[in-house]
């Protein structure tokens, strides 16, 4: 009877031991991937030219700035994370006679942390190597830290560019918020090696539904710098 019980109890122990070893093996692979990305892959990609622009939402000046960059580098894809309403960005590029095919806007992010959570998988799908992150001077400290953590953990090299501003954008650069964003970003580097959040609201600029805005009002900063005559008639602006 005792021998039967010992055999009965030994099976769960074997399964638990197997699960532990499997978990440690998987964790080892994830940590190795993170180490490889942050060292060799990051070094190799840092030697390459910028092949994507990432605009962090928060000020329309950042979108004006990336439009100026697009004049010089028309083939480089642009990802605007949240940012201004779609018609505003559409007008910025349209009035400069720039192609809309390389400009995308994701609408899932609600914070700087989520800017990177949702943008990094898109950049990986584009198979880019080096990303120029565009933000404002008042937002640069937190953006720089989070950009380095999120992009470097995937082996993507980073450059930061500050868009010229008048006044202070809406991003609140408090120390507590920066600390919390950095902390959860560092924690995210491990699961992010296998988890890639998908944003279902990514729109290419030449595919936006301008007529949707007939019944949904939109607002733009710096209205005096935008030629709204380019938009179809009937669009409702705040």
Image (spheres, helix red, strand yellow):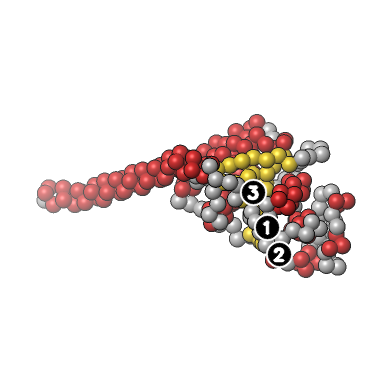
> Are dots 1 and 2 in contact, CB under 8 Å?
yes
What kind of element bears circle 2?
A: helix
Residue 72: where, in percent of width, then height?
71, 50
> Residue 114: which disc?
none
Can you tell which quarter of the image residue 217 is in? bottom right
For marks 3 and 1, give the CA distance. Answer: 10 Å
Residue 184: where, in percent of width, then height?
55, 40
Residue closest to the eye, 228 or 182: 228
Please give the residue where the numbered disc 1 appears in the rendered image: 103
> Are dots 3 and 1 in contact, CB under 8 Å?
no
Please give the residue where the numbered disc 2 appears in the rendered image: 206
Q: Looking at the image, which residue is at 44% across and 41% down?
A: 40
Q: Looking at the image, which residue is at 82% across and 39% down?
A: 166
Residue 93: where, in percent of width, then height?
76, 57
Q: Is residue 203 above or below residue 16?
A: below
Q: Looking at the image, which residue is at 71% across and 64% down?
A: 206
What kind of element bears circle 3?
A: strand
Quadrant of the snapshot with the C terminus? bottom right
User: What is the total number of numbered labels drawn onto the structure image?
Assistant: 3
Q: Rate crowding at label 1 as few (under 14), some (14 to 19) or many (20 or more) other CA atoms within 10 Å.
A: many
For marks 2 and 3, give the CA distance. Answer: 18 Å
Dot 3 or dot 1: first in sequence order is: 3
Can residue 107 be seen?
no
> Are dots 2 and 3 in contact, CB under 8 Å?
no
The reply, left or right, for residue 227 in relation to residue 160 is right
Dot 1 or dot 2: first in sequence order is: 1
Please give the residue where the numbered disc 3 appears in the rendered image: 54
What kind of element bears circle 1?
A: strand
Can residue 169 be seen?
yes
Residue closest to the eye, 56 or 73: 73
């Amino acid at each position: 009877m005792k021998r039967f019980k010992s055999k009965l109890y030994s099976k769960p122990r074997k399964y638990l031991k197997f699960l532990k070893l499997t978990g440690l093996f998987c964790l080892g692979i994830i940590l190795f991937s993170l180490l490889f990305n942050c060292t060799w892959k990051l070094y190799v990609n840092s030697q390459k030219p910028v092949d994507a622009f990432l605009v962090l939402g928060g000020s329309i000046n950042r979108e004006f700035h990336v439009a100026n960059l697009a004049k010089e580098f028309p083939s480089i894809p642009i990802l605007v994370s949240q940012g201004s309403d779609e018609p505003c960005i559409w007008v910025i590029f349209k009035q400069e006679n720039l192609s809309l095919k390389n400009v995308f806007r994701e609408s899932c992010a609600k914070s700087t942390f989520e800017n990177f959570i949702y943008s990094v998988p898109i950049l990986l799908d584009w198979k880019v190597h080096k990303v120029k992150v565009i933000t404002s001077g008042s937002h640069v400290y937190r953006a720089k830290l989070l950009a380095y953590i999120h992009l470097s953990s995937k082996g993507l090299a980073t450059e930061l560019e500050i868009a010229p501003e008048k006044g202070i954008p809406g991003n609140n650069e408090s120390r507590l918020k920066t600390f919390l964003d950095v902390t959860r970003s560092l924690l995210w580097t491990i699961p992010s090696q296998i988890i890639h959040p998908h944003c279902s609201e990514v729109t290419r600029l030449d595919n936006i539904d301008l007529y949707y805005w007939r019944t949904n009002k939109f607002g733009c900063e710096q209205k005096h710098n935008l030629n709204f005559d380019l938009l179809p008639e009937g669009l409702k602006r705040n």
